Image (tube, grey):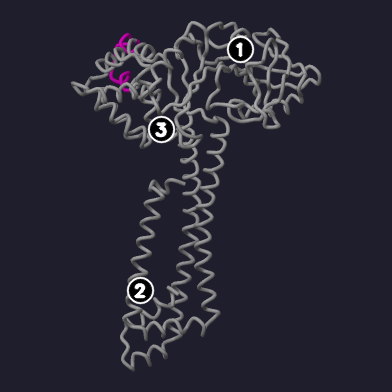
């Protein structure tokens, strides 16, 4: 867990530790100064074992309730994060087109020339925070096994650039040996374990894929392990050339996978910086400045700030920053890059268009603004892994908060029980305390004796 009730867990831990050390130091100092009172307080522990056991059990129960709440949150967080990293592997960002002459067969992203990838590789050749780019063609299609009638209604079909998988590979079979996707020819495909289980298919079987009502016979060349490029759902893997021929898209792709420097988890730490850099390369800055001029209207800026107040904290900060940049007369290169990154964010763009629509009575102006946003991006940059990891943190934090809230009631009951126990102890020890007062002890000495007993 990274946050509890909106507070960083490191800060909570540090604050709790400092508070505990201060209390421990204070009590220890008093004990050293007046050792007789310390002995009087500690001697009651072995003399009254039943009361001591009751107090200890009450404290342990309260601690157990809070620990279980924290453990539940951590478990949920770990489960979701593991699912994200297992499914995405080294992929941190996904680049897709918004507009295109050729849409995917099953509602997938539009296709664009593979030359865009070549240009992007040249632009990123000296950028050290990205360690891999991979061209892929993802589609979905119904697939059946004619031998037994088993079928998958929406099976993932992934064509992969096989020249060099780099950090995205290797793709391994069920025995752990790397498979060579580039060796696939004709109708040969690899399917993952999930697909093999659903179709009850094995190596050498023939399966049928249905594309626009036209069945295509494919041969299972092997079974690969789930995860990474092979995915967690039913997936068939082909070479990029096979996919382009199968979907009639020569020289085109519809997705670029991006891997940040680092492993499956640490790479996501660079996502914000890499996203801004990629959007700067894949966005038309002239169009961005035209959008700035269009939205730089006082009523629109006021509406943007009002909308920001109802949004989650991260998006609120970005939207307020966008409003400030929109009304700035001159932008330095860093500010311009930040504005471009904000405008290229789909969530921010939606809020900006809503604010513009609410303050514009001209449908043509609204249409023109909408078209500017469509023209803004050469490719859309989706910060997929960081977004999903944030979802994992938010979900775990919410569940854990609920458990803690319920646990606090039990903890308060336990604390009240302990308080009442010490009150009853004090009532029971009235004669003893009276004698102590008679021989010269003060009220604070009696309080200290109970503090020492409780700390022990």
> Residue 306: x, y in percent?
29, 31
| For marks 2 and 3 on the same chain, the one whose residue lies earlier in the sequence | 2
Q: In the picture, which quadrant includes the C terminus? A: bottom left
Secondary structure under tag 3 reads helix
Magenta stretch encompasses residue 359:
yes
Q: CA distance from mark 1 to mark 3?
A: 32 Å
Secondary structure under tag 1 reads helix
The residue lying toward the viewer, choosing from 29 and 353, is: 29
Disc 1 target residue:
243
The reply, left or right, for residue 139 in relation to residue 99 is right
> Residue 389: x, y in percent?
48, 36
Disc 3 target residue:
270
**Counting other residues with Cα less than 10 Å from the Cα at mark 1, is it few (<14), some (14-19), or many (20 or more)?**
many
- Numbered range of the magenta stretch: 355-367
> Residue 406: x, y in percent?
50, 55
Q: Quadrant of residue 153?
A: top right
Q: Quadrant of residue 39?
A: bottom left
Secondary structure under tag 2 reads helix
Residue 27: which disc? 2
Report how many numbered discs are placed on residues in the image: 3
Magenta stretch encompasses residue 176:
no
**Counting other residues with Cα less than 10 Å from the Cα at mark 3, is it few (<14), some (14-19), or many (20 or more)?**
some
Q: Main secondary structure of the magenta part?
A: helix
Residue 101: which disc? none
Which residue sits furthest left?
Answer: 329
Closer to the observer: label 1 or label 2?
Answer: 1
């Amino acid at each position: 867990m990274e946050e509890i009730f909106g507070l960083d867990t490191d800060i909570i831990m540090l604050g709790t530790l400092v508070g505990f050390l201060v209390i421990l130091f204070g009590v220890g100092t008093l004990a050293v100064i007046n050792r007789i009172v310390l002995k009087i307080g500690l001697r009651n522990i072995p003399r009254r074992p039943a009361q001591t056991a009751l107090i200890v059990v009450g404290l342990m129960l309260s601690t157990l309730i809070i620990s279980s709440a924290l453990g539940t949150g951590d478990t949920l967080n770990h489960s979701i994060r593991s699912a994200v990293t297992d499914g995405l592997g080294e992929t941190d960002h996904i680049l897709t087109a918004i507009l295109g002459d050729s849409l995917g067969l099953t509602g997938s992203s539009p296709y664009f020339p593979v030359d865009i990838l070549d240009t992007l590789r040249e632009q990123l050749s000296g950028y050290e925070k990205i360690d891999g780019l991979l061209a892929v063609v993802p589609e979905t299609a119904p697939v059946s096994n004619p031998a037994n009638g088993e079928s998958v209604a929406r099976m993932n079909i992934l064509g992969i650039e096989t020249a060099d998988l780099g950090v995205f590979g290797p793709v391994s079979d069920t025995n752990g040996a790397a498979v060579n996707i580039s060796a696939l020819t004709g109708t040969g495909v690899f399917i993952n374990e999930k697909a093999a289980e659903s179709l009850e298919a094995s190596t050498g079987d023939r399966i049928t894929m249905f594309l626009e009502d036209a069945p295509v016979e494919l041969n299972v060349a092997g079974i690969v392990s789930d995860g990474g490029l092979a995915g967690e759902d039913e997936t068939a893997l082909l070479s990029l050339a096979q996919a382009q021929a199968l979907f009639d898209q020569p020289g085109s792709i519809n997705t670029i996978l991006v891997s940040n420097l680092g492993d499956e988890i640490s790479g996501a730490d660079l996502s914000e910086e890499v996203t801004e850099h990629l959007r700067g390369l894949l966005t038309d800055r002239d169009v961005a400045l035209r959008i700035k001029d269009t939205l730089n209207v006082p009523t629109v800026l006021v509406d943007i700030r009002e909308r920001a107040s109802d949004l989650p904290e991260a998006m609120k900060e970005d939207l307020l920053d966008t409003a400030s940049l929109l009304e700035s007369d001159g932008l330095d290169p860093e500010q311009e890059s930040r504005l471009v990154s904000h405008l290229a964010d789909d969530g921010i763009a939606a809020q900006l268009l809503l604010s513009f629509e609410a303050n514009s009575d001209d449908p043509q102006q609204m249409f023109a603004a909408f078209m500017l946003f469509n023209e803004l991006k050469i490719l859309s940059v989706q910060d997929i892994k960081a977004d999903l990891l944030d979802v994992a943190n938010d979900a775990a934090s919410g569940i854990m908060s609920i458990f803690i809230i319920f646990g606090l009631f039990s903890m308060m009951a336990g604390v009240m029980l302990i308080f009442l126990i010490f009150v009853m102890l004090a009532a029971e020890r009235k004669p003893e305390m009276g004698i102590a007062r008679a021989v010269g002890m003060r009220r604070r000495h009696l309080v200290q004796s109970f503090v020492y007993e409780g700390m022990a």
